[in-house]
Amino acid sequence: MILHRKGTGMKLNKDFLTHNMSEDYYLVPVGGTDFSGIVKGNKTMGVIIELLKNETTEDQIISAMKTRFDAPEEVLTRDVEKVLAELRKIGALDE
């Protein structure tokens, strides 16, 4: 089991491209990954993905989300943790 600390730096894997269309956000592998398919997400996922284009931490992402969305911190934290877990599962994060 791999444990991830909230203060550990991470970045979107260079083998994934992003595209945003209206309210939908897409993440597509371009090679060098075991994942094949397209990930479609909402505005929340889109903001997280954009933040991951530069080295960042989970705490920094949560902090940025608090400035963008009017939602309780526990909801934002849960959303960030869920998106990061899915990105880890498909190999889209470099940590």
Image (tube, rainbow, N blue to C red):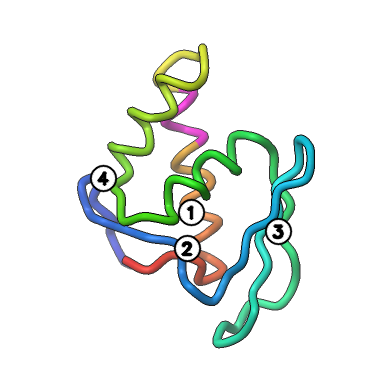
Amino acid type shown at disc 2: Arg
Magenta span: predominant SS is: helix
- Where disc 4 sits, the SS reads loop
Mark 1: amino acid: Ala
Judging by the rendered image, the residue that carries numbered circle 2 is 88
Q: Magenta segment range? A: 75-79
Give the image quarter of residue 63: top left
Residue 82 locus on image (x, y percent): 52, 44
Whether residue 35 is situated above or below residue 31 in the rendered picture: above
Residue 46's x, y, as percent? 60, 43
- Which residue type carries mark 3? Val
Contact? badges 3 and 4 (CB < 8 Å): no
Cα–Cα gap, marks 2 and 3: 13 Å
Q: Residues within 10 Å of mark 1 (few under 14, many from 20)?
A: some
> Residue 28 appears at what percent x and percent y?
68, 67
Describe the element under mark 3 as helix, strand or loop.
strand
- SS class of the residue under badge 2? helix
